[in-house]
Image (cartoon, coloured by chain):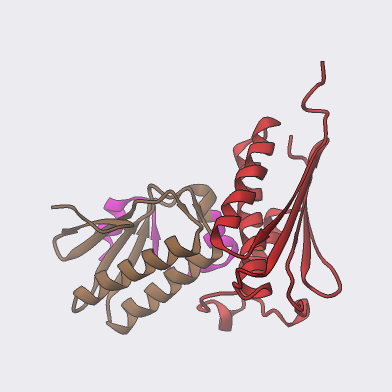
Amino acid sequence: MTEGVERLKFHEQGDVMVVEFKDSKILDDTVIQEIGDELFGLVDKQFRPKMVLDFTNVDYLSSAALGKLITLHKRVREKKGHLRFCAIKPKIYDVFRITKLDKIFEIHEDRDKALGSF
Amino acid sequence: MVDAEQTAEQREFVLPSVPESRETVERAVMEALERRGCGEDVLFAVRLALEEAVVNAIRHGNKSDPNKRICVSYLVEDARIVISVEDEGSGFDLDSVPDPTAEENLEADHGRGILLMRVYMDEVVYNERGNRVTLTKMGIM
């Protein structure tokens, strides 16, 4: 069953939470803050979180959004969980690569590969 | 008949330091570029760099004080766009900004905006005080 909050859609696939963004442009501070709050809320729900963040719908994101993703990454790590990203469009992937965040996050080409990586 | 592609377009905005100002400027710049038939790569690059510059001006320069203003201007001429973003702050020392790609900074949750501006624009120039940045992208057509 797919559930939604304001900024995200998510469902559980086995013991993995698969999360998609509703916004295609993750630029606005308010949007970024809300996304962050919702993501952290989802992490808090799981004892040892396993999460796949699917970027299919994302066309733009700013450095502030990257900062929020780093905070998410740290929160998941604190709970000894696992975080995967997938389906990042080439232009957005370039932003991860330029900022060397492709070294921090585990990024997969598509959702199946991300799910298979746990 | 005037060839729209040859006509320079220039606008200036003086806006409060609120999130909506970012959208106002971004919409205007994107529409100007779209009128000239700029490709997706250019639109992406300019949108991202402009976003970073405006957010820096609002958040860091003007401390998100809605009573403080940002001044954003753009000039589109020939095959380039020049954007200037100025805040009312006291500026900053560019040399003091740490490298966000250094190992010890990779997990910082901020500090990547200037890097992205430099990568996606051809020129990024700050005034001496550090409260105005001028971004130039060439070859936009």
Q: Position of residue A47 (x, y in %)?
A: 18, 79
Asked whether residue A104 is in view, the answer is no
Q: Closest to the observer: A64 or A117?
A: A64
| Residue found at x 82% / y 15% | B1
Q: Is residue B17 rendered magenta in the image?
A: no
Residue B105 shown left or right of residue A37 in the figure: right
* Residue B79 picture quarter: top right
Apparent side of residue A118 relative to residue B4 in the rendered image (left or right): left
The one nearer the camera, B31 or A60, is B31
Residue B136 versus residue B110 in the image, above or below: above
Residue found at x 70% / y 79%: B97
Going by the image, does A84 lie left or right of A100?
left
Q: Which residues are magenta?
A: A94-118
The image position of residue B15, as x and y in percent, is: 67, 58
A33 versus A20 height, above or below: below
Q: Position of residue B83 (x, y in %)?
A: 76, 52
Q: Residue at horizontal 40%, vertical 60%?
A: A107
Q: Residue lying at the far top in this picture: please name it.
A: B1
Q: Is residue A108 magenta?
A: yes
Count of numbered circles on the image: 0
Chain whose colour in the figure is red: B
Q: Is residue A56 visible?
A: yes
| Quarter placement of the C terminus of chain A | bottom left
Please tell me the colour of chain A: brown
Q: Is residue A77 above or below residue A99?
A: below
Image coords of residue A85 (percent x, y): 37, 60
The extreme front residue here reads B67
User: Closer to the camera, B2 or A83?
Assistant: B2
